[in-house]
Amino acid sequence: MNYFEFYEIPVSFRPDPALVKKKYIGFSKKYHPDLHALEDEDTRRKNLEMATFNTLAFNTLKDPTLTLRYVLQLKGLATDQEKFPLPPAFLMQMMELNEALTEAETDGNAAALQACRNGLDELESALAQEVEPLLRLPHAEELTPEQLQRVSIFYYKQRYLLRIQERINKFAPL
Protein backbone atom coordinates (compact mmCIF):
# COMPACT_ATOMS: atom_id res chain seq x y z
CA MET A 1 0.00 0.00 0.00
CA ASN A 2 1.34 3.43 -0.87
CA TYR A 3 0.64 6.69 0.95
CA PHE A 4 -2.03 7.79 -1.51
CA GLU A 5 -3.91 4.51 -1.18
CA PHE A 6 -3.60 4.72 2.59
CA TYR A 7 -5.12 8.20 2.64
CA GLU A 8 -7.59 7.30 -0.13
CA ILE A 9 -6.58 10.26 -2.27
CA PRO A 10 -5.48 10.39 -5.92
CA VAL A 11 -1.79 10.16 -6.76
CA SER A 12 -0.78 13.77 -7.23
CA PHE A 13 2.36 15.88 -7.08
CA ARG A 14 0.41 18.46 -5.07
CA PRO A 15 -2.13 16.72 -2.85
CA ASP A 16 -4.62 18.94 -1.02
CA PRO A 17 -2.80 19.94 2.20
CA ALA A 18 -6.02 20.25 4.20
CA LEU A 19 -7.14 16.77 3.16
CA VAL A 20 -3.72 15.27 3.91
CA LYS A 21 -3.78 16.86 7.38
CA LYS A 22 -7.34 15.66 8.00
CA LYS A 23 -6.42 12.09 7.04
CA TYR A 24 -3.30 12.25 9.21
CA ILE A 25 -5.24 13.43 12.25
CA GLY A 26 -7.92 10.79 11.73
CA PHE A 27 -5.40 7.96 11.48
CA SER A 28 -3.38 9.38 14.36
CA LYS A 29 -6.44 9.06 16.56
CA LYS A 30 -7.23 5.58 15.24
CA TYR A 31 -3.73 4.10 15.59
CA HIS A 32 -2.21 6.02 18.50
CA PRO A 33 -0.30 3.52 20.67
CA ASP A 34 -1.80 4.86 23.91
CA LEU A 35 -5.26 3.87 22.73
CA HIS A 36 -4.16 0.27 22.32
CA ALA A 37 -2.03 -0.18 25.43
CA LEU A 38 -4.33 -2.90 26.82
CA GLU A 39 -4.49 -4.86 23.56
CA ASP A 40 -2.46 -8.00 22.90
CA GLU A 41 1.16 -7.70 21.71
CA ASP A 42 0.31 -8.41 18.05
CA THR A 43 -2.40 -5.74 17.94
CA ARG A 44 -0.14 -3.18 19.65
CA ARG A 45 2.64 -3.94 17.15
CA LYS A 46 0.29 -3.60 14.15
CA ASN A 47 -1.11 -0.32 15.44
CA LEU A 48 2.38 1.02 16.06
CA GLU A 49 3.34 0.08 12.49
CA MET A 50 0.25 1.84 11.17
CA ALA A 51 0.94 4.92 13.30
CA THR A 52 4.49 5.01 11.96
CA PHE A 53 3.26 4.57 8.37
CA ASN A 54 0.76 7.40 8.93
CA THR A 55 3.53 9.71 10.15
CA LEU A 56 5.74 8.83 7.18
CA ALA A 57 2.83 9.41 4.78
CA PHE A 58 2.04 12.78 6.34
CA ASN A 59 5.65 13.97 6.40
CA THR A 60 6.07 13.00 2.76
CA LEU A 61 2.80 14.35 1.39
CA LYS A 62 3.01 17.70 3.19
CA ASP A 63 6.40 18.45 1.60
CA PRO A 64 6.29 19.23 -2.15
CA THR A 65 9.84 18.01 -2.80
CA LEU A 66 9.33 14.75 -0.93
CA THR A 67 5.98 14.23 -2.64
CA LEU A 68 7.57 14.81 -6.03
CA ARG A 69 10.23 12.22 -5.29
CA TYR A 70 7.68 9.78 -3.88
CA VAL A 71 5.40 9.96 -6.94
CA LEU A 72 8.38 9.54 -9.25
CA GLN A 73 9.47 6.52 -7.21
CA LEU A 74 5.98 5.04 -7.56
CA LYS A 75 6.31 5.53 -11.31
CA GLY A 76 9.79 3.99 -11.34
CA LEU A 77 11.42 7.27 -12.38
CA ALA A 78 13.37 8.27 -9.27
CA THR A 79 16.20 6.30 -7.77
CA ASP A 80 18.91 6.89 -5.22
CA GLN A 81 21.46 7.10 -8.00
CA GLU A 82 23.36 10.35 -8.10
CA LYS A 83 24.11 9.95 -11.81
CA PHE A 84 21.14 10.93 -13.94
CA PRO A 85 21.65 12.03 -17.54
CA LEU A 86 20.85 15.73 -17.61
CA PRO A 87 20.82 17.92 -20.72
CA PRO A 88 24.29 19.20 -21.68
CA ALA A 89 23.09 22.83 -21.75
CA PHE A 90 21.97 22.55 -18.12
CA LEU A 91 25.24 20.93 -17.11
CA MET A 92 27.15 23.75 -18.82
CA GLN A 93 25.14 26.30 -16.82
CA MET A 94 25.96 24.41 -13.63
CA MET A 95 29.64 24.30 -14.50
CA GLU A 96 29.67 28.07 -15.10
CA LEU A 97 27.78 28.70 -11.86
CA ASN A 98 30.13 26.43 -9.90
CA GLU A 99 33.16 28.20 -11.38
CA ALA A 100 31.74 31.61 -10.46
CA LEU A 101 30.96 30.33 -6.97
CA THR A 102 34.48 28.95 -6.52
CA GLU A 103 35.93 32.28 -7.59
CA ALA A 104 33.62 34.18 -5.21
CA GLU A 105 34.58 31.86 -2.34
CA THR A 106 38.30 32.13 -3.10
CA ASP A 107 38.20 35.92 -3.33
CA GLY A 108 35.77 36.33 -0.44
CA ASN A 109 33.77 38.55 -2.77
CA ALA A 110 30.32 39.08 -1.23
CA ALA A 111 28.96 40.82 -4.35
CA ALA A 112 30.04 37.93 -6.58
CA LEU A 113 28.53 35.47 -4.14
CA GLN A 114 25.25 37.40 -4.21
CA ALA A 115 25.38 37.32 -8.02
CA CYS A 116 25.72 33.52 -7.82
CA ARG A 117 22.75 33.37 -5.45
CA ASN A 118 20.69 35.57 -7.80
CA GLY A 119 21.67 33.45 -10.79
CA LEU A 120 20.65 30.32 -8.94
CA ASP A 121 17.31 31.88 -7.99
CA GLU A 122 16.66 32.76 -11.64
CA LEU A 123 17.49 29.21 -12.75
CA GLU A 124 15.21 27.73 -10.09
CA SER A 125 12.35 30.02 -11.10
CA ALA A 126 12.71 29.24 -14.81
CA LEU A 127 12.96 25.54 -14.07
CA ALA A 128 9.81 25.54 -11.94
CA GLN A 129 7.84 27.41 -14.63
CA GLU A 130 8.66 24.67 -17.13
CA VAL A 131 6.79 21.97 -15.23
CA GLU A 132 4.47 23.81 -12.86
CA PRO A 133 1.35 23.10 -14.97
CA LEU A 134 2.17 19.38 -14.87
CA LEU A 135 2.75 19.40 -11.12
CA ARG A 136 -0.63 21.06 -10.51
CA LEU A 137 -2.66 18.35 -12.27
CA PRO A 138 -4.96 16.66 -9.73
CA HIS A 139 -4.02 13.16 -10.94
CA ALA A 140 -0.47 12.16 -11.85
CA GLU A 141 -1.99 9.31 -13.86
CA GLU A 142 -3.12 11.93 -16.41
CA LEU A 143 0.48 12.58 -17.44
CA THR A 144 1.89 10.96 -20.53
CA PRO A 145 5.21 9.10 -20.30
CA GLU A 146 6.90 12.10 -21.95
CA GLN A 147 5.41 14.49 -19.40
CA LEU A 148 6.48 12.23 -16.54
CA GLN A 149 9.97 12.21 -18.01
CA ARG A 150 9.96 16.03 -18.03
CA VAL A 151 8.95 16.02 -14.36
CA SER A 152 11.70 13.52 -13.61
CA ILE A 153 14.31 15.71 -15.32
CA PHE A 154 12.96 18.67 -13.31
CA TYR A 155 13.41 16.68 -10.11
CA TYR A 156 17.04 15.82 -10.86
CA LYS A 157 17.83 19.37 -11.95
CA GLN A 158 16.23 20.62 -8.75
CA ARG A 159 18.45 18.28 -6.70
CA TYR A 160 21.51 19.62 -8.50
CA LEU A 161 20.47 23.21 -7.76
CA LEU A 162 19.83 22.33 -4.13
CA ARG A 163 23.42 21.12 -3.73
CA ILE A 164 24.69 24.43 -5.12
CA GLN A 165 22.31 26.32 -2.82
CA GLU A 166 23.68 24.38 0.15
CA ARG A 167 27.20 25.29 -0.93
CA ILE A 168 26.30 28.97 -1.17
CA ASN A 169 24.58 28.90 2.23
CA LYS A 170 27.57 27.15 3.80
CA PHE A 171 29.89 29.88 2.57
CA ALA A 172 27.55 32.79 3.28
CA PRO A 173 24.33 31.98 5.14
CA LEU A 174 21.41 34.32 4.63
Image: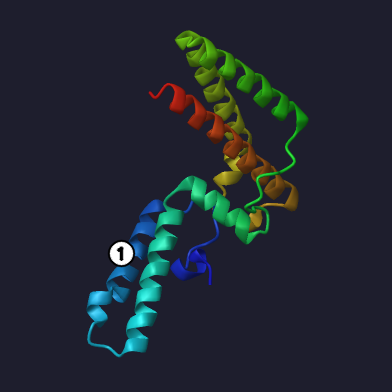
Callout 1 secondary element: helix
Residue at (64%, 54%) from the top-left corner?
A: 79
Pick the front one: 156 or 75: 156
Q: In this view, does 3 lie above or below 131?
A: below
Residue plotted at (50% across, 64% down): 4
- The front one of 169 and 20 is 169
Q: In which quarter of the image is residue 41?
A: bottom left
Image x and y of residue 104, in percent: 53, 13
Which quadrant would the C terminus be assigned to in this image? top left
Q: In which quarter of the image is residue 85?
A: top right
Mark 1 Cα-neighbour bin, 10 Å: few <14, some 14–19, many ≥20: some
Direction from residue 19 to residue 37 in the image, left or right: left
Total number of numbered discs in the rendering: 1
Name the quadrant containing residue 53: bottom left
Q: Where is residue 166 in the image (x, y as percent from the top left)?
A: 49, 32
| Residue 139 shows in the view | no
Task: Give the residue type that dot 1 points to.
Answer: Ile
Residue on which the image places disc 1: 25
Question: Which residue lies most toward the bottom here?
Answer: 40
